[in-house]
Amino acid sequence: MTSVGEKGAVGGRPSVVPAGARGATRIADRVVAKIASQAAREAVGPLPSDAAGPHATVVVHHDAAHVRVHLELDYPTDIGGRCHRVRRHVTERVGALVGMEVPEVAVQVERLHLTAAPGVAHGRAR
């Protein structure tokens, strides 16, 4: 005759419940947004001293994170190339660290900071 031990185990051995059946971990949208902001900061590279760092907002729906990144860039620069790097890096980092699919990363450039060439003063030349 078998005996039932602690926690419903048969024969005194603890029962093993598969990981997927034990529950779920809920990661708050603001946590995913902080991770996305940090990933964008890593990807965008050096910014002018008066530029604000990237800021992300996230909406999570059915284990998919829809990300919007707001950033400021120096100018002149390859805006499209830098935005592409931000999209790719945010997708990779959020996927790796949070385990969510990232089907969309919208990058919005809020402001461009003019960086003058060495020896050129700001303003118009007459």
Image (cartoon, helix red, strand yellow):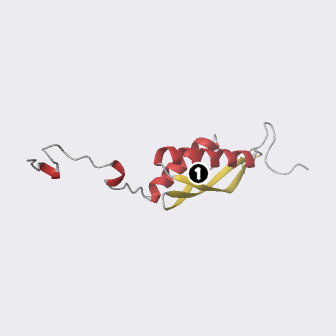
Q: What residue appears at the point 54 percent right and 50 percent down from the top-left corner?
A: 37
Query: What residue occupies the far front of the structure in this picture?
Result: 1
List x then y, in percent, for residue 86.
Answer: 63, 47
Mark 1 is on which residue type? Pro
Q: Position of residue 71 (x, y in %)?
A: 63, 53
Residue name at image x 26 percent, y 46 percent: 16
- Residue 64 in view (yes/no): yes
45 is higher (above) or lower (below) than 61: above
Left or right: residue 113 compared with residue 27:
right
Q: Nearer the viewer, residue 59 or 9?
A: 9
Few, some or many residues within 10 Å of mark 1 (<14, 14–19, 20+) = many
Q: In this rendering, would 22 be left or right of 111?
A: left
Along the viewing direction, whichever of 76 and 57 lies nearer the viewer: 57
Name the residue located 46 percent from the left edge and 48 percent from the top edge.
98
Residue 40 visible: no
Give the structural element (helix, strand or loop) at label 1: loop
- Residue lying farthest top? 118
In front of the other: 66 or 121: 66
